[in-house]
Image (cartoon, grey):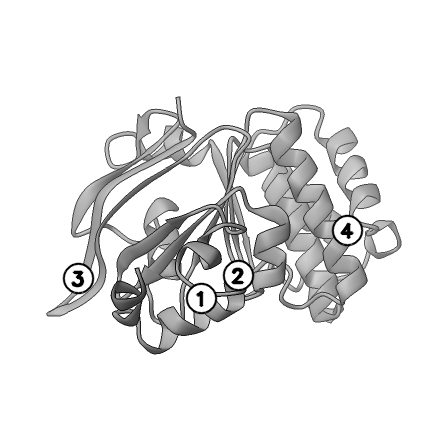
Amino acid sequence: MSVLTVENLRKLYGETVAVDGISFEVARNEMVGLLGPNGAGKTTTINMILGVLEPTAGSVRIEGVDLAAHRSRALAKTNFAAVYAPLPGNLTVYQNLRIFGMIYTVENLASRIEELLAQFDLGKFRDTKAGVLSSGEQTRVSLAKALLNRPPLLLLDEPTASLDPAVATDIRSSIRDFARAGDSGVLWTSHNMYEVEQVCDRVLFLSHGRILLAGDPRELPREHGKSTLEELFITIAREPLSLDRTD
């Protein structure tokens, strides 16, 4: 069973089509990159998977549980981190992790928090209010929160955008190890094509709310006459229809 199954997902805002009937899956132990220029529909897609937005049409199933029919059961199997969704700034790092751990009914919560504080090098900030941390430190707290319940489906929207290269490398390694070690899958958005090549098994390129390309990020550029994933990304962002002329 896939950890995520999206079928014919569509989102309209009036007459504007934000997501136009996309279908894809994320398998266990798989890291899938959701790529595309700003406005392509990536964040809208993630928000529908998280239940923040209601789809106009289509379905989302998380470990076989239909999100529309069994919202609480489905969302209990997920977690999420994004640079635009900071944790409550008036709570300390430890308080944030404890409260979210209680929401997700994490077993042996105190022990799990200590593991994550060590993993993300946050021990010295455990009693610091999250709002006074640097953007990179806040990102590490958000990632620790996202792994609290060892979610079968982990959703990450630009998870390393505020991190320096050395810390970002460590974070990528931690998330890759998380996906490989258990039964979880990861859906990851990023504008960093080097990062995508490093961590993702498969990528989906969105353009105007549709999946334009899908495949191995190390093979797709060559298949479409490009030398790098970044060059392919730029082509899609500037003129997606030109891909049809190079195939």
Do callouts 2 and 3 mark residues in contact (Cβ within 8 Å)? no
Q: Position of residue 109 (x, y in %)?
A: 70, 30
Res 74 quadrant in image = top left
Q: Which label sits on residue 170? A: 4
The residue identified by callout 3 is 12
The Cα atoms of the two marked residues, 2 and 4, are separated by 16 Å
Q: Position of residue 14 (x, y in %)?
A: 12, 69
The Cα atoms of the two marked residues, 3 and 4, are separated by 38 Å
Q: Is residue 207 left or right of residue 126?
A: left
The residue identified by callout 2 is 190
Say which of 90 and 3 sits in front. 3
Instruction: Please report whichever mark, 2 or 3, sits nearer to the chain's N-terminal start.
Output: 3
Instruction: Please report whichever mark, 2 or 1, sits nearer to the chain's N-terminal start.
Output: 2
Q: Residue at x 53, y 61 (%)?
A: 190
Name the kind of residue labelled 3 in the image.
Leu
Say which of 99 and 172 sits in front. 172
Q: Residue 38: in sight, yes or no?
A: no
Q: Residue at x 24, y 31 (%)?
A: 69
Name the kind of residue labelled 4 in the image.
Asp
Do callouts 2 and 1 mark residues in contact (Cβ within 8 Å)? no
The residue identified by callout 1 is 232
Where is the N terminus found, in terms of image quarters?
top left
Where is the C terminus found, in terms of image quarters?
bottom left
Instruction: Please report whichever mark, 3 or 4, sits nearer to the chain's N-terminal start.
Output: 3
